[in-house]
Amino acid sequence: MSYWEFTRRTITAVVVFILCNVAVIVLWNLCSFLLIVFTAWVIFIGIEVFVNWLEKLGLRRVYAIMITIFGTVIAILVGIALILPPIVTQFVDLANALPDASDEIVQEYETFYNENDNFQRFLPEFTYEDYQSLVNPSEGDDGLLDTEDGESSFDVTSLVGTAVPILGGIGSFLGDLVANFMLILFVTLYFVIDPMSYYRGIIAFTPTGMEQRAIDLLNKVRQIVMAWLGSLLVSIGAQATMVYIALGLVLNIPNALALALVAGISNIIPNIGFYLAAIPVILVTAAHDIRKLPFVIIAYIVLGETEGKFITPQVVQSRLSLPAGLVLIFQLIAAAFLGFFGLLLAVPILAICLMLIDELYVRGTLGKDHVFHVMEAHDGVLHLVDEEDDIPTAPRDVAAISESH
């Protein structure tokens, strides 16, 4: 190899390496925007179902779009009207009743502690005087100052200095949330108005002769998104129903319908959303009857675990053929690297990635038209089973497999 040939190849390798790194950096910086666009496309797929249904009834597409969007907005407003006012009312009642309720709880605890000697070795001593010293500390404690009449007042300067960073962070978060919501709304509208132009753009960049293959993959991606949306609706409906029965019909907690809707909708955020929705449930129960709070918490946790460990995994596995353990692991990875939208869309992203790997690599590159499944017999021997006819091939035990490799 000549010196100039070596130099040319070295420069080419360095340029390719730099371009690849630049592409990775650009895609990583655009990741949040791409997730927002994907979120808008997922919403569009859900809206498109109703638009197509109205078109089948004879309506023109423009009218079908208007009716669908108008109906969606009305449904959201009705949901807010059902959820927000009663919960706000309960919060106000709780704020008004909390001082008297806390005094009563402390006094009952002190009475129980003094009347039961057997529990004194396990429970800490906490009297009503101790409670008063916490809520009315002496001068200089925690930013509180004593006034001339002996009552405590806040040090406003200290309070403002502490609150401003917190309020600034909350304001920044809400601002980003509103901006992302508006961006998703506008992108979704563009998808709904003329979706075919975007599909034509994808086909335009597809290599010649691969157009039908690209269309087949797009159809499978759309089917995955529809299956995920269907499983999400089943999960929301099941969770809302169970919470309403437990809180409204069994425990007689007020505004159980609103709390059930919040609990159901919170399943949009996998795993953690349901427990975030426990906050209004706990506050409303405390405002209504604090003695029911332990039963409500236990029932809520049992329902959450039942739905999260049995109902949703079974629905997802039946509709998307995704193992529950793999879904949980991918959700953690997506949340760590992609943030909120990664956690929100972890399930459809995982299903789409597995489908593309199967179609493009397993079936395309490796040439496997069907997949063998591994089964274990009662004697511990592993078998290969053809998914098409479920007939085991010649079995080999684990030792034989290891020796062959």
Image: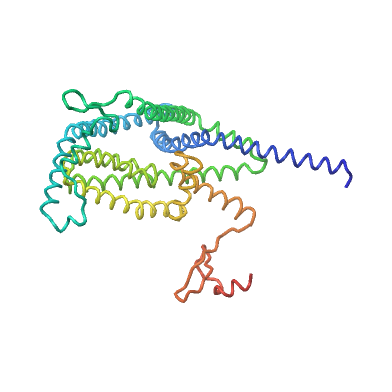
Count of all numbered marks drawn on residues in the image? 0
Task: Tell me which colouring the rendered structure shows.
Answer: rainbow
Question: In the shown orientation, is residue 268 left or right of residue 90?
Answer: right
* Percent coordinates x, y for residue 342 in the rendering: 47, 41
* Percent coordinates x, y for residue 381 in the rendering: 50, 74
Question: In the shown orientation, is residue 26 left or right of residue 65?
Answer: right
Q: Is residue 27 above or below residue 326?
A: above
Quarter assignment of residue 146: top left
Closer-to-camera residue (334/267): 334
Closer-to-camera residue (193/6): 6
Closer-to-camera residue (75/124): 124
* Percent coordinates x, y for residue 55 in the rendering: 41, 33
* Residue in the picture at 54% in, 63% down: 372
Closer-to-camera residue (141/344): 141
* Residue in the picture at 20% in, 35% down: 94
Q: Is residue 249 above or below residue 143?
A: below
Which residue is most to the bottom?
A: 379
Q: State which quarter of the image contains the C terminus.
A: bottom right
* Percent coordinates x, y for residue 323 in the rendering: 45, 56
Which residue is most to the right?
A: 2
Quarter assignment of residue 260: top left
* Residue in the picture at 34% in, 24% down: 160
